[in-house]
Amino acid sequence: MCQFGFWLILPLAQLLRQLHFTGQYFRLMLMRLSTTRSAALPMLFLLGSLWLTSCGDDDGPTAPPPVVIPDASEPIIYSKHIQPIWENSCAGSGCHMNGDRGGGLSLETWGDLVAGAKFGGVVVPFAPRKSYLLHNINTDTALAPVAITRMPLSRDPIPMEQVLVVKRWIEEGAKNDQGEIPYGGPNRKRMFIGAQSEDKVTVVDLEQMTVARYIGVGTLPDATTPPESPHNVLLSPDGRSLFVNLIVRGRIEKYDASTFEKLGETGVGNQPAQIITTRDGATLYVSNFSYTGAPTYVVRVDAATMRVTDTIYDVGYAPHSLVLSSDERFLYSINPGGEDVTEVDLSTKGVVRRFPISPGLPVNPIGGVKYEPYHGVLSADGKDLLVTCRQSSEVRIIDLATGTVTDSIPVGRSPLICGLAPNGRDLWVPNSGANSVSIIDLASRTVIATVPGLLTQPHAVAFSTDGKKAFVSCENRSGGSSSHHPVAGEEKAPGILYVIDTSTLNILKQFDIGSFATGIAVQQ
């Protein structure tokens, strides 16, 4: 720090040396001034002024720009209204400015901010209550959740009027000065995950591997009505359309997978559980699953018009999962309430065969289910149907040529929506009751590995196009959290997404997503 009065007591030669004045002119001036002290005073004042100017330029830190609070009608400009908040509050050592990246997060620029931290993204456009950035600076749980560890750490909280500006900025899309929304654009690849308890679909950006958006689904106001419950999601084969089934509402909806605009909807009966599509994307089949009212039908829907074109009756008791044969001539309905799988000829809409999940079981057994076949996938060669059984905690393999169960493979408790890896050899099975994933080698028909310790209730699995990553959604109804800083004031426990390296089985990343996370669809 410059001691601007100190020059008055220094010998002139020492003063000049500190100011780095060199050369013949100054040496000559020094010799002349040394003859009389009084003659030196005007020059000393001049040199002192130069010194002060030099110190101000070289040593003094530049003051941060003032925080400007915009009027309610004034557009928020990031560099004018948001960046100064960070520069005035977060510029100290160990924070997120001036080269420091606490937790891997930098607030130096808009680009740094939206890149997120080590644990994931901190801003979800249009969703301030889901944005960790707001959680960590907020002090009012009525406004949004509050992180237990408040930022800036060990300093005065950011004033509430500034917090409200940040909240509004996120509500309006968290845009940069050019009006760009984070993770936006039609060419980005995304993953979609149902959030059953809060009527949302979580959108994950596959490049940044962070939550990019939440799509509100359904038509009823969330605050005053029970959830309509998006139980599963499906992408059209071309990846352009997203279909969502609302299992409580009895409807399916269609959205643009790039703009998230709602394109249509239709009623499909009682508790639609799963949606599948033909390879050309023209036709949807929707199951109706409920142990109450005994639905036994599947609905066929025109995907373009979102109109019901057919109903296929008597497929089994409480059908949940649907699978098309390789040639798409047959539809297989997995029926938890009936303890069986039925084969439907789609040309006649009639059931042609019934496969008991265990030999000798009667149709619609009395006294509860013992196996509860829940979800099925087709083997890579199309010859076998691989079925998870929720009650008996196993995977059963049905030979479709003979219609018989040829094997039973024990897995963890309560297996749900399994997935066949792109290599065609490995079946990944999320075990909801065991908080694990079992990996079955289909050649040997044995469990070759288990991924343990997932928080909590793994529900579904999907894969990246190259097969290098597996994505596992966890319902997390028990309330665990993977967030960097735990929060108070959350209305519902978040779901959790795990990203797993399929070769090493290491967990690459985990982060919070929409509550009661269910089915997954990945753009290819």
Image: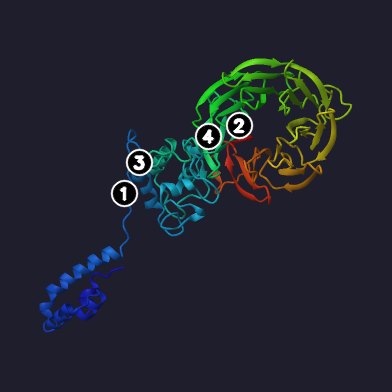
Answer yes or no: is residue 490 visible. Answer: no
In-image side of 212 versus 451 (left or right): left
Badge 3 or badge 1: first in the primary sequence: 1
Q: Which mark is residue 214?
A: 4
Q: CA distance from mark 3 to mark 2?
A: 35 Å
Nearer to us in this view, 285 or 12: 285
Element marked by disc 1: loop
At a point 24% along the width and 69% down the height, the residue shown is: 4
Element marked by disc 2: loop
User: Which of pointers 1 and 4 indicates the residue nearer the eye?
Assistant: 4
Query: Disc 3 marks which residue?
Result: 77
Query: Disc 1 marks which residue?
Result: 66
**Of the residues shown, which amino acid type is indicated by label 4?**
Tyr
Check disc 2: other Cα within 10 Å, few if <14, some if 14-19, many if 20+: many
The image position of residue 155, as x and y in percent, is 43, 54
Confirm or deny contact between disc 4 and disc 3 (CB under 8 A). Answer: no
| Residue 374 in the image: above or below residue 501 | above
In the rendered view of the protein, which quadrant contains the C terminus?
Answer: top right
Query: Disc 2 marks which residue?
Result: 197
Say how the picture is coloured: rainbow
Q: Quadrant of residue 49?
A: bottom left
User: Which of pointers 3 and 2 indicates the residue nearer the eye?
Assistant: 3
Q: CA distance from mark 3 to mark 1?
A: 14 Å
